[in-house]
Image (cartoon, rainbow, N blue to C red):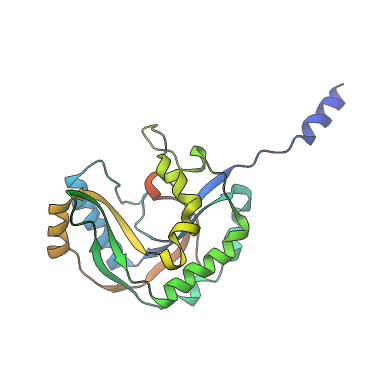
Amino acid sequence: MLALGLGFFSCVPKKTNSIAIDVLLIPSEEMYAQSIQLNALINQNNPETIKLDENHKPHITLLQCFIKEENLPKVNIALKGLFKTIKNDSLMAESLFYYKDEEESFSMIAVEKSDFLLKLHEKIIELIQPYTVKNGSQVSFIQNPDGSSISESTITYVPEFVEKHSYDNYEPHISLGVAQTKLLDSLAENVFKPIQFKAASLSVYQLGDHGTAQKLLWKSE
């Protein structure tokens, strides 16, 4: 009976977890520092919005998706060597983007959609699509420290990224958070600097709530 029982359990398929990942570029030092500075000023205005720090990295998303956790090594292998093809290319931080006709708005640093950045975005989708799955859930994300649930908008955004936010709809940016528009007007005029910068690395992070890059899973050599 024991042998039969062991045989039965060995035939039960092992449950595989899906994780929410962000394939992204970390900006080089000057742009990284400006992102942190702007976000800190936004946090003074609205402490409830996202906070950029060592555990919530400023970044430019190239692809968000769910993958089976067991396929992470295959994803890493697929991306290997890709950073070398773009590490000397310049990116351009064009503007502080927000909705000026609203009292309060989400804000971001808009990054120029250059040819090389768009091609990188498309290449990464091509390489990673064989490993993507649709069935992500709350547990696919790094959990909120306060125990609150991952927002539904975060969970639904990830599997829709390729269909709704890629190719012609791709808008590269660095997210900064929500603040009053009066403050954002002041930041746009007095603090934000349009600059050219390079990427410091191509990385894969596990996502937290609101699209934050929280847990480093892989980094380009």
Residue 122: percent from the left, percent from the top? 50, 69
**Is 30 in front, or is 19?**
19
- Return the residue found at the far top: 1
Count of marks overlaid on the render: 0
Q: Is residue 66 above or below residue 31?
A: above
**Is 156 in front, or is 188?**
156
Q: In the image, is 2 to the left or to the right of 17?
A: right
| Quadrant in the picture for residue 98 | bottom left
The structure residue drawn at horizontal position 52% and vertical position 40%, both measured from the top left corner, is 137
State the quadrant of the N terminus.
top right
**Is 34 in front, or is 169?**
169
The structure residue drawn at horizontal position 53% and vertical position 64%, both measured from the top left corner, is 125
Q: Is residue 191 above or below residue 212?
A: below
Residue 131: percent from the left, percent from the top? 61, 56
The structure residue drawn at horizontal position 14% and vertical position 58%, both measured from the top left corner, is 185
Residue 169: percent from the left, percent from the top? 41, 64
The structure residue drawn at horizontal position 57% and vertical position 66%, both measured from the top left corner, is 126
Q: In the image, is 212 to the left or to the right of 163?
A: left
Q: Is residue 148 above or below residue 167?
A: above
Q: Is residue 91 above or below residue 1?
A: below
Residue 3: percent from the left, percent from the top? 86, 26
